[in-house]
Image (cartoon, helix red, strand yellow):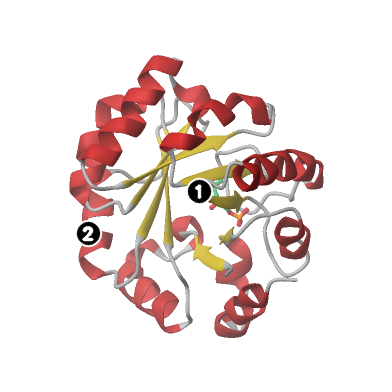
């Protein structure tokens, strides 16, 4: 089944509770929450208090995407704030600390996930997939909403999808960046089952139909 995760990066932050309520009404599966620290990516977004506030008003799980340097430092805080899925970039710390962050997340009852930037090969995340409940393939450079979808990431998506399938891992496969009505099909064809959509969802004149369309898959 295809899942849809609207990214609140493109939401009206002054009306976040209403935006999250609408997402749920429109059939979204996860609330995608982008955390940026101005170090790992050249932008700053929101942090732990906003995750806690969103967790209080959301009826659907929070999919928290950490784009921060050395995320092990904040793993416990994000888990306690109410993340349901917590995603770490493989590039954001040493392999030892990434492994520790994934294990700590699992110990705290939250689903751990790993993410990979466009310039990083699939092979970088494969050793972690046994520990993960989801893997996120970026289809733009992380940092900003509204960028152009990178179709050249599809072979990487396919490689990861095959790895998961061959080993029968319990691991979802998410794509993030430039995903919309024109680009979601190739993601699904190449094995993605969770589609993040920021600007495409929030700019849509009929977001419910948009979610329905993505749910249909190919
Ligand atoms: C980018 C973020 C994305 C972003 C997607 O760094 O990780 O989640 O919100 O926005 P769109 O769908 O507009 O590319
Ligand atoms: Zn994201």
How busy is the neighbourhood of tag 2: few (under 14 within 10 Å), some, or many (20 plus)? some
Please name the residue that numbered disc 2 is placed on: 53
Q: Nearer the viewer, residue 115 or 191?
A: 191
Disc number lying in front (2 or 1): 1
| Quarter of the image that includes the C terminus | bottom right
> Quick check: 5 left or right of 57?
right
Classify residue 212 as left or right of residue 11.
Answer: right
Q: Does the numbered disc 1 mark a residue whose Cβ is under 8 Å from ligand 2?
A: no
Q: Where does the image place residue 215, in percent across and percent down from the top left?
A: 61, 75
Q: How many badges with numbers are in the image? A: 2
Q: Is residue 179 above or below residue 141?
A: below
Is residue 146 something that shows in the picture? yes
What residue is shown at x 81% (from left), y 41% (from top)? 152
Neighbours of disc 1 within 10 Å: few (<14), some (14-19), many (20+): some
Q: Report helix, strand or loop for mark 1.
A: loop
**x, y percent for residue 52:** 21, 54
Q: Residue at x 23, y 47 (%)?
A: 109
Q: Secondary structure at mark 2?
A: helix
In the visual, does 176 lie left or right of 20? right
Question: In which image quadrant can residue 78 be found?
Answer: top left
Query: Mark 2 and mark 1: span between their CA atoms?
Result: 28 Å
Q: Which residue is mark 1?
A: 171
Where's residue 95, x and y in %?
45, 17
Task: Decide which of tag 2 and tag 1 comes sooner along the chain.
Answer: 2
Q: Between residues 96 and 144, which one lies in front from this camera angle? A: 96
Answer with the quarter of the image where residue 4 lies. bottom right
């Amino acid at each position: 089944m295809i899942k849809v995760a609207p990214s609140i990066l493109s939401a009206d932050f002054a009306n976040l509770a209403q935006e999250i309520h609408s997402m749920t009404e429109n059939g979204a599966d996860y609330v995608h929450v982008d955390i940026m620290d101005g170090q790992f990516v050249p932008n700053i977004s929101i942090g732990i208090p906003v995750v806690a506030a969103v967790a209080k008003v959301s009826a659907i799980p929070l999919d928290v995407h950490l784009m921060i340097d050395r995320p092990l430092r904040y793993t416990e805080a994000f888990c306690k704030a109410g993340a349901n899925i917590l995603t770490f970039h493989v590039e954001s710390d040493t392999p030892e600390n990434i492994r520790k962050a994934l294990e700590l997340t699992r110990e705290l009852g939250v689903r751990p996930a790993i993410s990979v930037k466009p310039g990083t090969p699939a092979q970088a995340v494969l050793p972690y997939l046994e520990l993960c409940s989801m893997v996120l393939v970026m289809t733009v450079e992380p940092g900003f909403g509204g960028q152009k979808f990178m179709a050249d990431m599809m072979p990487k998506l396919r490689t990861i999808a095959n790895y998961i399938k061959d080993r029968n891992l319990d691991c979802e496969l998410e794509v993030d960046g430039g995903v919309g009505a024109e680009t979601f099909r190739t993601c699904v064809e190449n094995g993605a089952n969770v589609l993040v959509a920021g600007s495409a969802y929030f700019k849509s004149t009929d977001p419910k139909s948009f979610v329905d369309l993505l749910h249909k898959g190919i």
